Image (tube, helix red, strand yellow):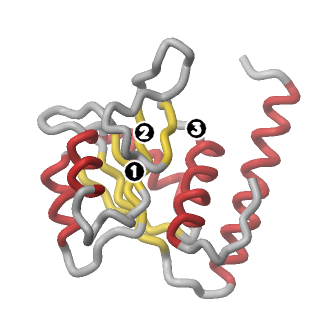
Amino acid sequence: MQSNFEMTFENKAIENVMTFENKAIEKNEVPIKVLLVDDEESMHCMARLALNSTEYSLVSAKNVNEARQVIASQCPPDIVITDAMMSGESGFSLITSMKSNPTTSKIPIILWTILEQVNGAVLDSSGKADITMSKPFNLPHIMESLMRAKQMMRPDLDILF
């Protein structure tokens, strides 16, 4: 159970993110295409709800093969969020292949996983994810990670954390 301080902090973080996102929408910026790769449909539903009315446009892939098709399309994603463990090929192999390809190596990748090390840090066995975050779904952490990824693709933006 969260303390009053944690709830207030989380609500303030959400309010700040939404204010930032609404300003971007008012400026008619082109949406940032986010590819979510996860084999759990519930994660896609929660992400759609969270990113609705923000500057992010969500594209879904249920596995690595679908993700590769989206990435290879004429409109590749600006940011990729991938689960580590999925049926079939893992998110780690997607990360490794993207980072070794000059065409996709600059796309920021957020690794979203339940895997943790003993110290509680998120485990990235590929060692190549730009940002790591732990599941379950946590709106402030997702929005903060997306803003960090956006900063990586647009370093001229002045975003403070």
What is the CA distance from the residue labelled 3 to the residue labelled 2? 11 Å
Between 8 and 104, the one nearer to me in the picture: 104
Q: Residue at x 80, y 30 (%)?
A: 6
What is the CA distance from the residue labelled 1 to the residue labelled 3? 14 Å
Q: Is residue 78 left or right of residue 94?
A: right
Instruction: Using the image, determine if residue 43 lies above or below residue 27.
Output: above
Q: Amino acid at mark 3?
A: Asn
Q: Nearer the viewer, mark 1 or mark 3?
A: 1
Helix, strand or loop status at disc 3: loop
- Residue 68: x and y in percent read 18, 59
- Residue 137: x and y in percent read 51, 36
The residue that disc 2 covers is 112
The residue that disc 3 covers is 138
Q: Amino acid at mark 2?
A: Trp
Tell me the tag on residue 81: 1
Instruction: Using the image, determine if residue 119 lies above or below residue 10.
Output: above
